[in-house]
Amino acid sequence: MRIPNHISQQVDKLREAIDRHNYNYSVLDEPSIPDSEYDKLFLELQKLEQSYPQLITLDSPTQRVGATPLEKFSQITHRSPMLSLNNEFDTSSVEAFDRRVGEKLGTNEVEYAVEPKFDGLAVSLLFENGSFVTGATRGDGYIGEDVTLNLRTVKSIPLHLRKSDKNRIPFLLEIRGEVLMLKEDFEKLNLQQREKNEKEFMNPRNAAAGSLRQLDPRVTATRRLAFFAYGIGEFEGEEIPRDTHSNVMKYLASQGFPIAKECDVVRGSVALLSYYQKVKELREHLPYDIDGVVYKINSLAQQKEMGFVSRAPRFAVAHKFPAQEVVTELLGIDVQVGRTGVLTPVARLRPIFVGGATVAHATLHNEDEINRKDVMVGDSVIVRRAGDVIPEVVGVVIERRPSNASRFMMPNQCPVCGAKVIRMSDEAVTRCTAGLFCPAQRKQSIMHFASRRGMDIEGLGEKLVDKLVDNGFVVTPADLYTLDDEKLTSLSRMAKKSAINLLAAINKSKSTTLASFIYALGIRNVGVTTARELARYFGDFNKLKEANVKTLQGIPDVGLVVAQSITDFFSEKHNIEVINKLFSDPVGIELKEERDIRKMQDGNNANKISGKTFVLTGALPNMSREDAKERIESLGGKVTSSVSKKTNYVVVGAASGSKYDKAVELGIVTLDEAKLLELLKN
Ligand code: 9MJ
């Protein structure tokens, strides 16, 4: 059957549009059309290809998804070997590397291309006449497994190259890079696995490996994998740069391959080390796991001159970060009691250095988690500490389990107060039933009451709260306001001056906002955002106190569970007694009207924030993005995730990428942290 001209033109047009939108979405992380529009284009192309199967090509976007499963992977011999890098772990080895290079090349300050070292799986993608034909794992460096069908499902891998300036396409090109799973997608995948009662993955790397080495490409297609290019192997084609590695990387980016935003070019060992430091600080803010940085001599001629030693190049090294995952012995499992009575099992570990600190405890979350991970006391466990995140046990090395390993049992009594514990059938957690009669819960709720986002009582830390509760000076939050310097100075290690400061802070906290007060009460399931919503909706504490479930459910983001928690809280006699005490003499909490505060702010900076839309991008030097978001929202601003014409400000931190470019393109005001703080200052 002859294919009408307008049909092949329409097919070309659809493919071009789908590829472009896919690139914007998967590589630039800047969706250009809504999903529904994309689906429409895709469906139209699929229909045309069904009617005219002769038009189907291997690099059509419809050919990414779900081929039939394989029996086993076949093997692919790489055109040029996939080298491994030598690892360096300390400053002096990096200096020695730079010295060796300098001596061999007879150059003083060698130029290096520097890049983050992805913690994923190395793959090689072969493009022939511009089309993606095969893709393989690294294997032994010479022969890998053919995972082409799985790699086709990775949306950020282009299925064909773009024509170069000279309108040419390389005859042959091997692209080298790493397949990985973004941290965010890893969390989502594990959540799904948990819901399906299937085994969770230990870390993003394992999840990526498990997804890529799947015999059924339909499974891989459901996993969100990412790809980043970091070099090329064999190539034939005039348009490929032959001067520097950084130009090769630019070429790859121009061909639609994702490359790390953190790539740079520097000179000399001092600059190498400061790059290492910079990326190390960025590490926890990056969307993917990295395990170090890579230094490569930038000049390809100089690379050739350096040559290889056995299977590793002499022109590049990996400078590894301290490990974030280590194996240590699980000595025991302690049980801690939190503010809402939740019993949390905590691993007691043989102390070990991980992620830059010595760790002796790690969370085990809850009983189900222990069972799912099959953790037993005495096991060798894998402990992960990434950035400021609480260390956690992610898995067990089963082969090393000793014969005397013992199972953990959740106690049936609260380990702090001895009261009965219960586990609701629909909850993963076990709780102490004693409420505020349990000293552990009492301490935690007082800490919460005094926290920064609550009543903001400066200087009331954990140790002091322990003493105040243990001495019987404080039973409920209202008792904080009955403290005097005599009581305080009777506590060990409490100097007169600290006592005076604390009393002043307690006194100051009496004047607060409705939102902070609601949050401070520690109602289950009511966090900062919900507290703010409730304050905005009711504007009056008594109205909130008397609201019923139905009214509460009418508030944005308040579902049945939250509504029920609120009414449960106010139906508890004990809670009402404490609240009454807080509002009457001698305490006399005073809630400033939010509107008054807004008026005050409108006078100066709030009109610059209230009603304005902010986008935060990159890591800020001194505050977390969460903090910045909260502070902007507390002044009536809105924080969204993508830059558009409606955005008023883009707050730019380190390693900000496309959002910054977009802001510049649209002429939107950009702020650094200092300027943001100036705006927030009130
Ligand atoms: C990773 N893993 O990110 C190389 N790598 O170069 C980077 N690996 C590499 N480069 C030559 N950025 C061999 C391996």
Image: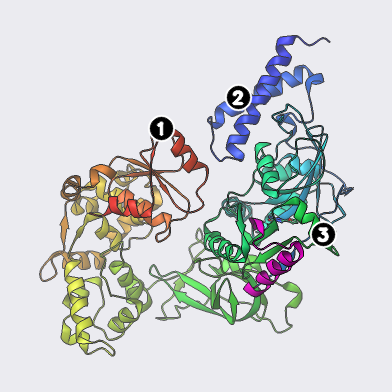
Contact (Cβ within 8 Å) of mark 3 with mark 2: no
Q: CA distance from mark 1 to mark 2?
A: 25 Å
Q: Which residue is mark 3?
A: 307
Q: Earlier in the sequence, mark 1 or mark 3?
A: 3
Name the side, left or right, on which 291 lies relative to 8: left
The amino acid sitting under disc 2 is Lys
Q: Which residue is mark 1?
A: 645
Circle on res. 475: none
Against 36, residue 420 (above or below) is below
The amino acid sitting under disc 3 is Gly
Query: Considering the numbered disc 1 on the image, is that residue within a helix, a strand or a loop?
Result: loop
User: Which residue is located at x 68 percent, y 40 percent?
Assistant: 251
Q: Earlier in the sequence, mark 1 or mark 2?
A: 2
Ligand 1's image quarter is: bottom right
Q: Earlier in the sequence, mark 3 or mark 2?
A: 2
Residue 564 visible here: no
Point out the stretch of residues depicted in magenta.
Answer: 90-118
Q: CA distance from mark 3 to mark 2?
A: 52 Å
- The residue furthest left is 585
Density class for disc 3 (Cα within 10 Å; few <14, some 14-19, many ≥20) is: few
The percent coordinates of residue 84 (x first, y second) are: 78, 60
User: Which residue is located at x 57 percent, y 71 percent?
Assistant: 355
Is 112 a magenta residue? Answer: yes
Name the side, left or right, on which 633 lies relative to 49: left
Is 34 a magenta residue? Answer: no
Mark 1 or mark 2: which is in front? 1
The amino acid sitting under disc 1 is Lys
Q: CA distance from mark 1 to mark 3?
A: 51 Å
Q: Which residue is mark 2?
A: 40
Density class for disc 2 (Cα within 10 Å; few <14, some 14-19, many ≥20) is: few
Query: Considering the numbered disc 3 on the image, is that residue within a helix, a strand or a loop?
Result: loop
